[in-house]
Amino acid sequence: MKQQWLNLAARIDALSLRERVLVLLAAMAAVGFLLHQILIAPQLAQRQTLTAQLRQQETQSRNIEADIAARIAAYKVDPDQATLAQLAQLRGQTEAASNALRAVRQGLVTPEQMVPVLQQILRANGKLRLVSLRSLPVSGLSGAAMAPPPAQAAAVVPMGQIETKAEAVATLMHAAQAAAASAPAPAAAIPGAVSAPAKPRELLYRHGVELVLQGSYLDMLTYMEALEKLPVQLFWGKAHLQAAGYPDLKLSLTLYTLSLDEKWMSL
């Protein structure tokens, strides 16, 4: 082995200076390449692997953050928002209907006061005679029951403020229908059972009386004018004038009021 090193040294000594420099550079390059392959190349490969893993983890992290943000945005939207808005609208309609009902009720005659008021006005006009007085069946303030009875084919006494009365009835109809629409839906029917169509809950009831008066035409007009000037309000149904026994006439007059109570006293 020693002899081999000596032979190698002798051969190097035999080289010129330029050749020695080239040999030295080649040896250094070979050593550098070996060091790179043994020490540096594995580190670079490991670094590239770690960099790729890091980029993959960053991508996964961004995807997770995007998913979390989407879920948070979805939870911020209330699934019952449309239902709550509809409920608020129905509550507003109910409150408006209640206010309209209260406003109209303040000036109405109560069912208990109706007959005494009519009798009081009749006593004030002693020339008229009360032929009959009867109560009419109570009807709910909905559907066809709201429409005033049509006039008979006979002479009809002028009503004075009849349009104002009709507008008041129309206002109550609209209020009752709006409140009935906001009422809770009825419970589901039993499977297999045949159920009748749901009937809306009545909010107001119409209480009416029919009285027949006998006397002169002017006295009857005076009586009806007194009814119009009452501080409380009555609704007109119909007025039928029978002129067969002129000048002694008969007037069939229908009046009604509104109440929350279905109960109606008997006459």
Image (cartoon, rainbow, N blue to C red):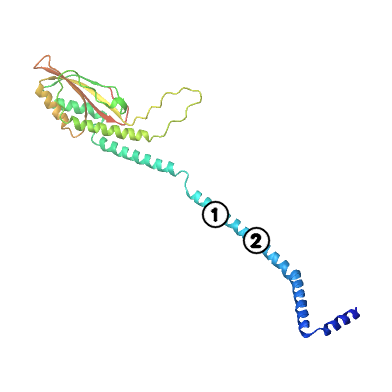
Label 1 sits on a secondary structure element that is helix
Residue at (62, 58) in percent of width and height:
57
Residue at (34, 35) in percent of width and height:
179
In the depicted structure, whether residue 247 falls above or below residue 68: above
Query: Residue 142 — which label?
Result: none
Kindly identify the amino acid type of the residue bearing the numbered disc 2.
Ala
In the depicted structure, whether residue 66 falls above or below residue 88: below
User: Which of the pair 67/192 is nearer the observer?
Assistant: 67
Residue 29: give x, y in percent of width and height.
75, 75
Residue occupying the far top of the picture:
244
Residue 50: give x, y in percent of width and height.
67, 63
Q: Quadrant of residue 46?
A: bottom right
The total of numbered circles placed on residues is 2
Residue at (15, 25) in percent of width and height:
122
Residue that numbered label 1 is attached to: 66
User: Which of the pair 65/54 is nearer the observer?
Assistant: 54
- Which quadrant: the N terminus? bottom right
Disc 1 packing (10 Å; few <14; some 14–19; many ≥20): few
Distance in Å between CA atoms under marks 1 and 2: 21 Å
Mark 1 or 2, closer to the camera:
2
Q: Quadrant of residue 115?
A: top left
Residue that numbered label 2 is attached to: 52
